[in-house]
Image (spheres, rainbow, N blue to C red):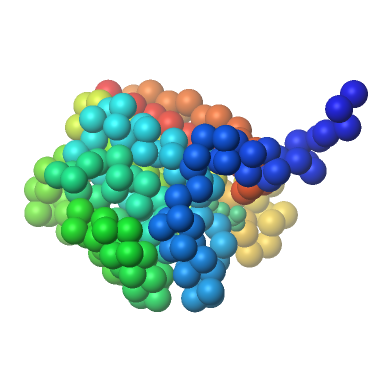
Amino acid sequence: MSGHSPEHDAAAVDQYVARALGLNDPVLDAGREHAHRSGLPQIEVSAAQGKLLKLLAELVGARRVLEIGTLGGFSTSWLARGVGESGQVVTCEFEPLHAKVARENLERAALADRVQIHIGPAADTLATLIDENTEPFDLIFIDADKRSNVTYLGLGLELARPGTLLIVDNVVRNGAILDDPDEHGEASADIRGVQDALAWLGKDPRVDATALQTVGAKGWDGLAVARVL
Ligand code: DHB
Ligand code: MG
């Protein structure tokens, strides 16, 4: 018996993996510190998850990425690296302070020139992009207010093409998707938003989806991955 358990050691294993694979980038780590010092919620993706986003962007040959939920720009930076120098990341953020910190972090990481931050309700930004007949995105990462997941999926689909990769963060939330949302007080709309997103991904004929549980520095959670048909 090793004496280890996922509950106690998942964060330590994430650190081990990050060190073994060289995922602790000093520039991105400084950006994360800047975000935490600025009072942003400490809910950014882990380094391992960020690297997964970069690899997925590279694997699908993404030139254009849409991110919903910029926060301090940590996942944004990984995605921006994934699209390469000539690629573009369009990212939506509701909170002006988050957008300001993200912009500073992207500048520090020399990635600002390939990232456009739209401040305001993401649904409005997406509607504008649809009206403008924006070129379809190759990868769409949804990681914002969970209660709006289905809104973002629906609008995101209108900005996608067959083959676009959809990724939805936080679809397990410590197992809360098993619960009755009404028993979660203020979080009920967000739990329902996650449940509805999975139901939507399961039944909408325009997508083909799976979801995986994850443990790590961010606890027990998961992500859904789908291909637009
Ligand atoms: C939490 C984590 C996230 O990745 C997120 O996007 C929102 C909330 C959380 O742990 O509460
Ligand atoms: Mg998230």
Q: Residue at x 28, y 28 (%)?
A: 60
Q: Quadrant of ligand 1?
A: bottom right
Residue 9 falls left or right of residue 147: right
Q: Quadrant of the N terminus?
A: top right
The answer to whether 6 is drawn above or below residue 70 in the figure is: above
The answer to whether 149 is drawn above or below residue 36 in the figure is: above
Q: Quadrant of residue 71?
A: bottom left
Residue 160 falls left or right of residue 12: left
Q: Which residue ends up furthest to the left in the rendered image? A: 133
Viewer-proximal residue among 229 and 83:
83
Residue 27 image position (x, y, % from top left): 41, 58
Q: Taking the image as drawn, is residue 92 in sight? A: no
Q: Taking the image as drawn, is residue 135 in sight? A: yes
Viewer-proximal residue among 97 and 27:
27
Viewer-proximal residue among 138 and 56:
56
The answer to whether 106 is drawn above or below residue 34 in the figure is: above
Q: Residue at x 38, y 23 (%)?
A: 208
Q: Quadrant of the C terminus?
A: top left
Q: Residue at x 19, y 58 (%)?
A: 113
The answer to whether 80 is drawn above or below residue 116 in the figure is: above
Q: Residue at x 24, y 35 (%)?
A: 62
Could you tell me how many numbered marks the image carries?
0
Residue 220 image position (x, y, % from top left): 66, 42
Residue 19 image position (x, y, % from top left): 57, 41
Residue 133 image position (x, y, % from top left): 9, 48
